[in-house]
Structure formats: C-alpha cells, structure tokens
Amino acid sequence: MKYYIIAGEASGDLHGSNLMKAIKQKDPKADFRFWGGDLMQKEGGIMVKHYRDLAFMGFLEVAKNLPTILGNINRCKEDIAQYRPDILVLIDYPGFNLRIAGFAKSLGIKVVYYISPQLWAWKEGRVKSIRKNVDEMLVILPFEKDFYQKHGIHVHFVGHPLLDAISGLQAVDAQSFRKENGLNSKDIIALLPGSRKQEVEKMLKMMLSVRPYFKEYQFVIAGAPSLTKDFYEKYVDENVHFVSNKTYDLLRCSKAALVTSGTATLETALLDIPEVVCYKGSRISYEIGKRLVKNIQYISLVNLIMDREVVKELIQDDLTTQHLVHELKLVLGENRKRILNDYRQLREKLGGQGASGIAADIIVNG
C-alpha cells in the first residue's frame, strides 16, 4: 500500500521512523512519501519536506510566518492529491495536520492520527475536527483514551513508542564516549535546550548561567539535528562541550540534566536521569497560552502522566539562575533517590513495549 506520513518535529521524526520500520515488517511492499526528517529518510521512501523548515515557535513567530505556513499547507494538499495514498498517517503537529486531515478525507483517503495533539490541555474544540475527519486515533498516553472516548471518538491506546526506542539501545561505554567527544573526567550535566533556534538561544543562556556554582561538573550541550554545529560554537569553552546526534548516549553518561519542556523530558526520565524542566517563552505567547490552557497543572510529560510533581518545573518568571541552581543541587543530592523511584512507577504507567508494532498493525490491517 501507499502511505503518506506527516511529522513536523524532531520527536515526530523519531516516532515516524520507528512506525515506518514496523509497517514494512507487516507490509513488505509499503511505499512511503512523507514530511519528516533524517531518521524517517533512513527508512526509505520520498521526503517531500524536512521538519526543520516547518518549525515556528510561539504565536508571534507563527503570525509572522503565516504566508510560508499556508504555502506549505497548499503544497502538501497538492502533493497528496497527486500521490493518492491509501492511508494518511498524521503524527502530532495539529495546527498543520488537522487542516490536511479534512482535505484528505474529502478525497476519500483513510486518515489515521498517531500521537495525539494535546487537545486535553487546550483547544478542546478541535475534537470536532478529529471526530469528523479522522478514522483511527492512536494515542500513547494512558489518560488520552478516556478523553477521546468521552467525545465519542474511536481510539486505541498503543503504549508509548519511546519505550521501544530506548529498550533497543546498545550499551554505552562512558569512558569511550568521553574520549570520542573530548570530555574530561568530571561528572556530566547534560543540557537539552530544545530543537528550534529561537528556543535554544533563550534556554542555553539561562542553563549556562549556573556554571559558576557547579565548577566540579562539566556541561555538555545536546545538539539538535535541525541546527548546525557552527550555531553552538559560541557557547563552547573549556568546560562547556557539545555533542551532536548522541543525546541518548550523552544522557546515559550524565549525572543530571537541564531539559527544555517537551518530549525530551520523558526521554530523560526513561533513561533514569534526574532532571530539572525549564521553559521560558515570549511574554505575549506565554500570557496567551496561559489563558488558553485548561485544567492543566504541569507542562512536562513526566508530571502529566504521573499526575503529580515528579520533576521540578521552572516556568517563565520562575526560571531564574537562583532557582535553577537550587533545584539542580537537589536533583544531584537529596532528591535523587526519590526521583529514580518515581521514574520506575512512570514506566509501569506507560505499559509495555511494542507501541510501534501495535500502531502499524492497526494502520496496515485496520
């Protein structure tokens, strides 16, 4: 069969690549055309557009780049109409994907949504669009199934694909990793500042402000695949290092991590690394978002899934050097054992492995 897949972010590229791999096992003649990234490209097929060209963050940036965004939507519709896939698979990225869903449905194409947008947090009205235009909803967080069933949508909880991605990792030799990346013998604090240029610049400045208080550690930046090494060079010195496309290895060699809110918070937890979650957007975007979000106490996936504070979140005005120093000292010391115990409970809540295979079976076999 012919599959058209749309992933608009780095995390979607990861989950999309694992899904493609699982689909090929069930449908050896699978033909792929997609919007995604390098990981999906490795699985074969034709990449129409890379997600790095789709990443616009915050209300102001979206408004400023609206002509580009609308142009991408039109291009995608034209490409789908020409390719005529048997199945359209949408991965998160709701602002774009929900527009494409309605178009594909009008052409009689089966629409599967894999990895739900966070409608339970805001824009619950979009549920109507999903009910009208999506044939199968595949969710990866346990509480999402109840949310969609409440709205009369056919939904499957398939488990979280990160469990598959992480369980398949080969062991990492910390000594070899340090040598290969020019790191010294000090314990490592990993910095995961995000994947968008605007976001990374803002978050790295704050994360690196704690350095004078942790001279016994070395800081290592996890580079985003969408950004070049040159972009990070201004942050690197004798005690701040940079690695690219090795985030999982870096985390597994680290003592703790400072992580920008997003999928990376869950990845860090599943790799058993105590973390502090950070987020700071533009004042206007933050104030708009705060008024739109409903009944949500947390921003990190770890705390949302556990429905309590497992990891500390420093958001907007709370994200200061003083607060960050205080919380980092806690995860390196007295809170470490408690956090690791909570992580074990988190894995239990997410269910077992096999999410990509379960999702692929539903997509291929209906």
Image (tube, grey):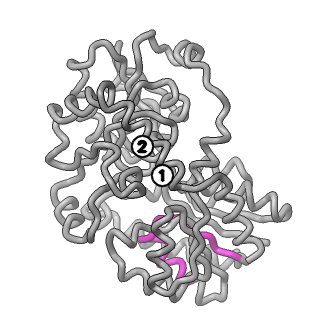
Between 270 and 247, the one lying in front of the other is 270
- Asked if 47 appears above or below 327 in the picture, the reply is below
How many residues crowd mark 1 within 10 Å: few (<14), some (14–19), many (20+)? Answer: some
Q: Residue at x 35, y 12 (%)?
A: 238
Between 16 and 139, the one lying in front of the other is 139
How many residues crowd mark 2 within 10 Å: few (<14), some (14–19), many (20+)? Answer: some
Q: Which residue is mark 2?
A: 342
| Real-space Cα separation, disc 2 to disc 1, in angstroms | 34 Å
Looking at numbered disc 2 in the image, what kind of residue is underneath it?
Answer: Asp
State which tag comes first along the sequence, 2 or 1: 1
Q: Residue at x 40, y 50 (%)?
A: 302
- Asked if 47 appears above or below 78 in the picture, the reply is above
On the image, the x and y values in percent for residue 93 come to 46, 65
Give the magenta-colored segment's residue range.
87-103
Which quarter of the figure is the N terminus placed in?
bottom right
On the image, the x and y values in percent for residue 232 come to 38, 30
Q: Secondary structure at mark 1?
A: helix
Q: Identify the residue at the far right of this view.
A: 28
| Residue 133: quadrant of the picture | bottom right
Q: Identify the residue at the far top of this view.
A: 185
**Direction from residue 14 to residue 61 in the image, left or right:** left
Looking at numbered disc 1 in the image, what kind of residue is underneath it?
Answer: Arg
Q: Residue at x 17, y 32 (%)?
A: 321
Between 258 and 12, the one lying in front of the other is 258
Q: Residue at x 40, y 29 (%)?
A: 190
- Asked if 77 appears above or below 46 in the picture, the reply is below
On the image, the x and y values in percent for residue 73 come to 49, 73
Q: Which residue is mark 1?
A: 52
Using the image, tell me which numbered label, if any, was put on residue 323. none
Residue 227 appears in view: no
